[in-house]
């Protein structure tokens, strides 16, 4: 009996220790890797570090959009329960920020929980605070996209969502380049999931996004938007779009749509305002198409400037059910007079001489029915029927801008080709891409798509369109001091599937100076039939206002250039280079206590700090280079006013002898 009990106990003990041995073997040998993995998961976690989004500039390096990074610092008191450690942390924060240590001790008087030691710390102290390495301390960054001039060029710039993803405009088209590449950091955490510290050697720093320089000129964009806005003082105007282009390159210098929105607060505006109607919407060009039709006929040697046709005294019936009318009756008129008087009958008689396939080929060559391939979202291709789909009336309707739908950008590009010597260019909205350190990555160059008309034809058209402004329907587009050419247009707008008699698209497309065009400017206004709605009445005066101010601005720039050259020749003391030696604490205080009427010394700031400060002063900013600021065009202590321009030059600390563009 006793022996049986001994055997039973022995076997039980043996089995118990055998089971323990097996479990230890299973844990330490068989499941070793899995257990290590689970332990690391409990102790470590990986967080994504958001990359700083690239900046957006105009063609002259004027800053239009940037990312403001707000950094806040926190303490997990469950990891900092020792009064000595709290005093140490409070003292170190006090040294960096200038606040008394008691301030931080009062925040950390609780026994547990997470407390915020610094909210949106000044840029000048962020790096110093990040250098404090203590278990339980951590920081968080919030990225805020800032559009410096609020509504300016909102349809071109677009906006980003809370995840820093571009949703419209250039922000969307170039999202991948602007966004950069996020980094990662490994966090050592407590058993309860609280943060203890970061493991620096496992941190992968983010790669900042590329910067985009637009072809847009901020000053010209201002002018176009302001003059377009003035047109709304006429209660008959309901919408508007204006595009300013360099006809010899296809560069878009200004692009404005009304109504617009503030991308800083895009959620405060209806979604319908987000789209850029200059590329997404279509309209019947109306009489502005007559210039294209006449150019095709001249290029095909079917007429010249003085060819005369009989305009049927205002009513032409080429087919039984087709009636073409003029607003005023005309008899025999020349090609020149057809454009001056905007005769539907006259242009129909001219285009009647052209084979339908040839006419269609010219319209396609001018870009109608195809996307322009501008790098903006949701571009329409418009509509242009093939000759096999034409009715008896189509050829005539096309000649004066009906049975064809185009985007405003397509019309602007067509007129560029019409007056630049006959070359259709692909439109450019982005001039170059630049890495965050200032190194140029890619630069856009003019892209000629095709020759549309001969150079001689283009020269004739410039003369004919000059006559429209001098003696025809475009008189109100005249500008003192420069020669202007162009064409008026008035067309009924689509409501459902028919052209409305209540709403019109009133337009003027022109160029200046006529002798050697530097600008092509399109103005289209949505109007109601209850008041003035002809293109010559409402759109041409807006064109004149914009062109007048552009001319004045150009003269001012010439005068400033002469003055600067004179100053440079007589004195070399106008250029001021500032030392990089400065006190961080003083700079931090300066940001907080700005005198709005006096220019501070920003030498030694990094670009983000300088941008933040100058934006608070409401100055226009132009940036040259990358790195720390070494020059500023407005001297410290100078009296300043909102809207003044400050050019800041920065040098990359890695290349101290090389000034970057």
Image: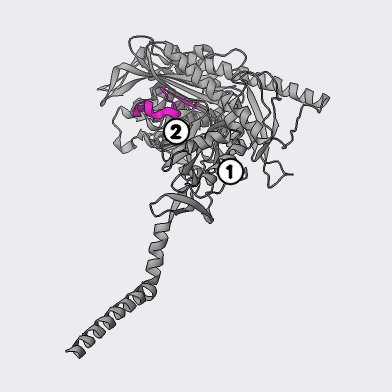
Identify whether 483 is placed above or below 392. above
Q: Can the viewer see residue 337?
A: no
In the rendered image, residue 655, in percent from the top left (x then y), is placed at 70, 46
- As drawn, is 31 to the left or to the right of 57? left
Task: Please identify, in this view, whether the residue under mark 1 or under mark 2 is nearer the observer.
Answer: 1
Residue at screen point 39% across, 16% down: 311
In the rendered image, residue 465, in percent from the top left (x then y), is placed at 52, 20
Residue at screen point 47% across, 31% down: 156
Q: Which residues are magenta?
A: 255-273
Q: Nearer the viewer, residue 285 or 530?
A: 530
Q: Can the viewer see residue 266?
A: yes
The residue tagged with tag 2: helix, strand or loop? loop
Kindly identify which residue carries mark 2.
158
In the rendered image, residue 596, in percent from the top left (x then y), is placed at 61, 20
Residue 436 bears which disc, if any? 1
Specify whether residue 261 is painted magenta. yes
Q: Nearer the viewer, residue 480 or 91?
A: 91
Residue at screen point 45% across, 37% down: 376
Of the numbered discs 1 and 2, the one sitting upstream in the chain is 2
Q: Nearer the viewer, residue 638 or 80?
A: 80
Q: CA distance from mark 1 to mark 2?
A: 21 Å
- The quarter of the picture where the N terminus appears is bottom left
- The colour scheme applied to this rendered structure is one colour
| The residue positioned farthest toward the front in the image shown | 2
- As drawn, is 623 to the left or to the right of 397? right
The residue tagged with tag 1: helix, strand or loop? loop
Dividing the picture into quadrants, the one containing residue 6 is bottom left
């Amino acid at each position: 009996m006793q022996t049986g009990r001994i055997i039973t106990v022995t076997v039980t003990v043996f089995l118990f220790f055998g089971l323990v041995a097996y479990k230890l073997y299973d844990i330490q040998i068989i499941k070793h890797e899995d257990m290590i993995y689970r332990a690391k998961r409990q102790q470590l976690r990986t967080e994504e570090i958001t990359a700083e989004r690239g900046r957006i500039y105009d063609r002259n390096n004027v800053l239009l959009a940037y990312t403001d990074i707000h950094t806040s610092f926190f303490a997990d008191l469950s990891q900092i329960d020792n009064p000595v450690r709290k005093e140490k942390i409070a003292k170190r924060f006090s040294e960096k920020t200038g606040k008394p240590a008691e301030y931080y001790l009062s925040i950390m008087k609780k026994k547990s929980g997470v407390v915020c030691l610094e909210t949106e710390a000044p840029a000048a102290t962020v790096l110093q605070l990040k250098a404090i390495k203590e278990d339980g301390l951590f920081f968080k960054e919030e990225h805020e996209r800032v559009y410096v001039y609020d509504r300016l060029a909102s349809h071109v710039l677009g906006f980003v969502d809370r995840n820093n993803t571009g949703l419209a405009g250039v922000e969307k088209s170039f999202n991948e380049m602007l966004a950069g590449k996020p980094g990662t950091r490994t966090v050592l955490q407590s058993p309860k999931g609280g943060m203890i510290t970061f493991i620096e050697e496992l941190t992968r720093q983010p790669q900042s996004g590329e910067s985009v320089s637009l072809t847009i000129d901020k000053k010209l964009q201002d002018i176009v938007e302001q003059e377009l806005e003035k047109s709304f003082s006429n209660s008959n105007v309901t919408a508007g779009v204006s595009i300013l282009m360099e006809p010899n390159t296809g560069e878009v210098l200004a692009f404005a749509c009304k109504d617009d929105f503030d991308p800083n607060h895009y959620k405060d505006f209806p979604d319908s305002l987000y789209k850029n109607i200059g590329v997404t919407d279509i309209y019947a060009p109306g009489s502005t198409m007559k210039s294209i039709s006449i150019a095709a006929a001249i290029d095909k040697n079917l007429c010249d400037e003085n060819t005369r046709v009989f305009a049927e005294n205002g009513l032409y019936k080429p087919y039984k059910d087709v009636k073409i009318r003029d607003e005023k009756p005309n008899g025999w008129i020349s090609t020149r007079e057809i454009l001056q008087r905007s005769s539907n009958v006259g242009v129909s008689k001219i285009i009647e001489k052209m084979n339908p396939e040839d006419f269609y080929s010219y319209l396609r060559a001018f870009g109608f029915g195809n996307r322009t391939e501008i790098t903006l979202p949701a571009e329409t291709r418009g509509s242009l029927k093939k000759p096999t789909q034409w009715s008896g009336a189509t050829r005539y309707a096309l000649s004066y801008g009906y049975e064809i739908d185009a985007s405003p950008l397509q019309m602007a590009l067509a007129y560029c080709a019409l007056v630049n010597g006959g070359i259709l260019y692909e439109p450019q909205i982005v001039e170059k891409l630049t890495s965050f350190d200032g190194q140029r990555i890619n630069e856009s160059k003019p892209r000629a798509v095709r020759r549309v008309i001969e150079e001689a034809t283009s020269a004739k058209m410039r003369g004919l369109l000059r006559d429209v402004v001098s003696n025809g329907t475009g008189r109100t587009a005249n500008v003192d001091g420069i020669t202007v050419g162009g064409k008026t247009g008035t067309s009924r707008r689509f409501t459902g599937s028919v052209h409305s008699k209540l709403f019109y698209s009133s337009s003027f497309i022109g160029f200046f100076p006529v002798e050697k065009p530097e600008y092509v400017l399109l103005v289209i206004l949505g109007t109601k039939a209850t008041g003035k709605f002809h293109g010559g009445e409402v759109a041409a005066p807006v064109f004149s206002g914009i062109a007048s101010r552009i001319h004045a601005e150009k003269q001012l720039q010439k005068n400033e250039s002469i003055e600067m050259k004179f100053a440079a020749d007589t004195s070399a003391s106008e250029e001021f280079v500032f030392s990089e030696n400065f006190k961080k604490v003083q700079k931090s205080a300066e940001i907080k206590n700005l005198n709005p009427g006096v220019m501070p010394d920003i030498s030694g700031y990094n670009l983000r700090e300088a941008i933040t400060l100058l934006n608070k002063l409401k100055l226009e900013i132009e940036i040259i280079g990358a790195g720390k600021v070494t020059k500023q065009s407005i001297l410290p202590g100078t009296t300043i006013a909102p809207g003044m321009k400050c050019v800041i030059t920065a040098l990359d600390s890695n290349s101290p002898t090389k000034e970057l563009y």
